[in-house]
Amino acid sequence: MQALLEFAPLLAFIVAYYIGGLYEATAVLMIAMLALLAVDYLLQRRIPPMHALSAVLVFALGAATLLLHDKHFIQLKPTALFWLAGLAFLGSFWIGKRTLTERLLSAALQGQVRVPDTTWRRLNALWVAFYGVLGGLNLLVATYASERVWVNFKVFGLTVLTFLFIGSQVMWLTRRAEPAAAA
């Protein structure tokens, strides 16, 4: 259920884009993000940090897009989100007991394997690089491709790349990590 909720704003954006264009889609995205935050709070009594960051970027860059009638602001949103997330992963090397990669992927591994700290740190560095590359790719596509190509890349390309990256890491970890000790 939560996974479907996370994709609702993206789905609303793409549908609105094909019906009315980028500016209408931007307005719909802003409303959908507000709805997502409300649902987050109603279901969990909190708003996940990534949703909050994404919403702030959508509201700020979406408002600039609509007020100035300039598509470049909303096109910067994925890059800003990815680069800020990359900085968060980078900061997790020094802040907290575990890297962000370990915190995120440990749940997917469900305690079935034991992963050495050095492996978690290497994977965390990969996330930093991955988010840097995704942000750069978004800038390239937004700058040199048509608006329609950028929208499809944003909705489908970036999403698929992210799932492939996460899935490959989980598969790699489950194949190469040591089995967890039986309790």
Image (tube, rainbow, N blue to C red):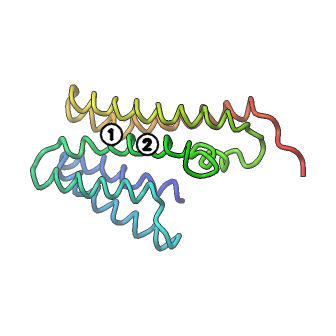
SS state under label 2: helix
Residue 87's disc is 2
Q: Quadrant of residue 142?
A: top left
Position of residue 101 measured from the top left corner of the image (x, y, whole percent): 58, 43
Residue 47's disc is none
| Figure check: 123 above or below 96 | above
Whichever of callouts 1 and 2 sits on the residue coming sooner in the sequence is 1
The three-letter code of the residue at mark 2 reads Leu
Residue beneath the point at 51% across and 54% down: 3
Position of residue 78 measured from the top left corner of the image (x, y, whole percent): 33, 42
- Extreme-front residue of the structure: 94
| Figure check: 110 above or below 172 | below
User: Are the residues flagged by discs 1 and 2 in contact, CB closer than 8 Å?
Assistant: no
Position of residue 61 measured from the top left corner of the image (x, y, whole percent): 23, 51
Q: Specify whether 110 is left or right of 86.
A: right
The N terminus sits in image quarter:
bottom right
